[in-house]
DNA sequence: TATTGTTATACTCTATAACTATA
DNA sequence: TATAGTTATAGAGTATAACAATA
C-alpha cells in the first residue's frame, strides 16, 4: 500500500502523459489516425479475431470499435469475412496492404522513441513497459464491477458551483 | 539505447494506457471533466500564473487552455485578475471553492488508486511515477523542434489506400 | 510589428441508445 | 429472449486560423 501523496502524484502523471501520446500520434501518416494504428497492431499481435474480442483488447465500447474497424476496412488494411460458426459475427484480419502500413508505423514509432529516449537504457525502457502493462492489468478487472459512485452526494463541494 | 522491439512495445503500452486514464476520469464528479481537474491541480501546485504558463504546463495549445480556464472560472473555482505588469494578460488563481473541490478530487483519485493498486508496493508506485515523469521530460524538449515529417513521401504504403 | 488571449471551426475519440440480424 | 454488430447522436478534448487588445 502506497502513501496518499504518491497516489496523488500518480494521478497527476497519468493526466499529463497525454502530451506524450499526442506527440506519438502526430508522427503517424495523415491517413492513419492513432485509433487505426491500434486496431492494426492488435490484429497483428493476436491474429484473426471477432469485433467483440477486438473491442475487449482495445478496452473501448464495441460501437466505437465498429467505427475504427470500418475506417481501416475502407482503406483496404483489413478484411472482414463472415464467421462460419456464427452468422452474426465477422472475422477480422490484416491484408498485405495492412502489413505494409504496419511496417511503416513500426518504423516511425521506433525512430521517434529512439530519438526522444536516446539517453534511456534498455533496462529503463523495459521497466517502464513492465510497469505500464501491470498498471493496465490492475485496472483491467475493475471494468466489470459496479460503477463506483460513493461521493456524488448533494453535500459534495462539487455540487455547489455557485459557492 | 533500447532494442527495436522494446520501442514497439512501449508504443503499444502508451497507446493502451488511455483505458486507465478514462477510468480515472469516470470517477470525477459530473461537473468536473478531467481537463478541469488538470487546471485546478496545476494552479494548486504552482500557484498564481498566466494563461501562457498554464498552457505550457498542460502541454496543450493556449486556445484550448483558454476554454478550460473559462469553464472552471464560470464555476467559481478560479479567479482571473488583470496582470498589473501587462494589460494583455490575466493572472489565474484558485478560489476557496476551487480548493474545496480539489480536496474532493484528491480523495477520489486516492481512493480509486488505493483500490486498484492494493497489491502494489510503495516502491512500485514510486518507480512508475518516476519513470512517467522522466518520459514526459524526455519528450518535453522536442516540442520546440521542427515538425518531424521525414516519411510522408508519396511512395509510402500509407499513401496507397486503394492498393 | 510582435505578443497575449479569445473565439470559430473542424477533427478525433468515446459512450449511450436504438436498431438489425442471428443464436 | 439474448447476443453480435452497426448507426445516430451527443459530448469531451485538441489544433489551426482569424481576431482583438496591448506591448
Image (tube, coloured by chain):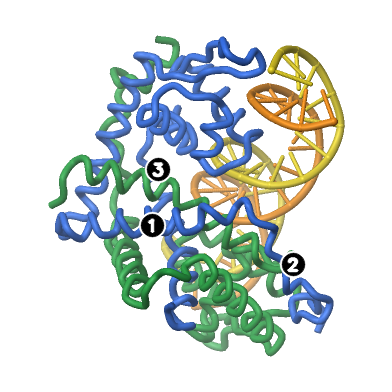
Chain colours: A green, B blue, C orange, D yellow
Pick the residue in front: B76 or A145.
B76
Residue displayed at 24% across by 54% down: B116
Q: In 3D space, how far apart are the residues under numbered discs 3 and 1 (Cα atoms)?
A: 26 Å
Pick the residue in front: A137 or B69.
B69
Q: Would you place residue B27 above or below residue B85 in this image?
A: below
Residue displayed at 30% across by 55% down: B130
Q: Which residue is mark 1?
A: B134
Q: Would you place residue A2 above or below residue A140 in this image?
A: above
Q: Please, what secondary structure does the residue beneath circle 1 have?
A: helix
Q: Would you place residue A90 above or below residue A7 in this image?
A: below
Q: Badge 1 sits on which subunit?
A: B
Pick the residue in front: A23 or A88.
A23
Residue displayed at 48% across by 14% down: B79
Q: Badge 2 sits on which subunit?
A: A
Q: What mark, if any, has residue B26 been given in the picture?
A: 3
Q: Would you place residue B163 above or below residue B24 in this image?
A: below
Q: Is residue D22 left or right of residue A13?
A: right
Q: Which residue is mark 2?
A: A31
Q: Position of residue B35 (x, y in %)?
A: 49, 36
Amino acid at each position: 500500500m502506497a502513501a496518499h501523496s504518491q497516489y496523488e502524484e500518480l494521478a497527476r502523471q497519468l493526466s499529463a502523459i497525454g502530451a506524450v501520446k499526442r506527440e506519438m500520434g502526430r508522427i503517424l501518416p495523415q491517413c492513419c489516425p492513432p485509433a487505426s494504428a491500434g486496431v492494426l497492431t492488435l490484429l497483428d499481435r493476436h491474429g484473426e479475431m471477432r469485433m467483440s474480442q477486438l473491442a475487449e483488447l482495445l478496452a473501448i465500447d464495441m460501437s466505437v470499435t465498429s467505427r475504427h474497424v470500418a475506417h481501416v476496412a475502407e482503406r483496404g488494411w483489413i478484411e472482414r469475412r463472415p464467421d462460419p460458426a456464427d452468422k452474426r459475427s465477422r472475422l477480422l484480419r490484416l491484408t498485405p496492404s495492412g502489413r505494409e502500413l504496419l511496417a511503416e508505423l513500426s518504423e516511425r514509432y521506433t525512430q521517434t522513441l529512439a530519438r526522444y529516449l536516446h539517453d534511456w537504457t534498455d533496462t529503463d525502457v523495459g521497466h517502464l513497459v513492465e510497469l505500464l502493462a501491470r498498471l493496465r492489468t490492475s485496472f483491467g478487472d475493475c471494468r466489470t464491477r459496479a460503477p463506483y459512485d460513493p461521493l456524488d452526494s448533494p453535500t459534495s463541494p462539487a455540487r455547489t458551483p455557485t459557492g
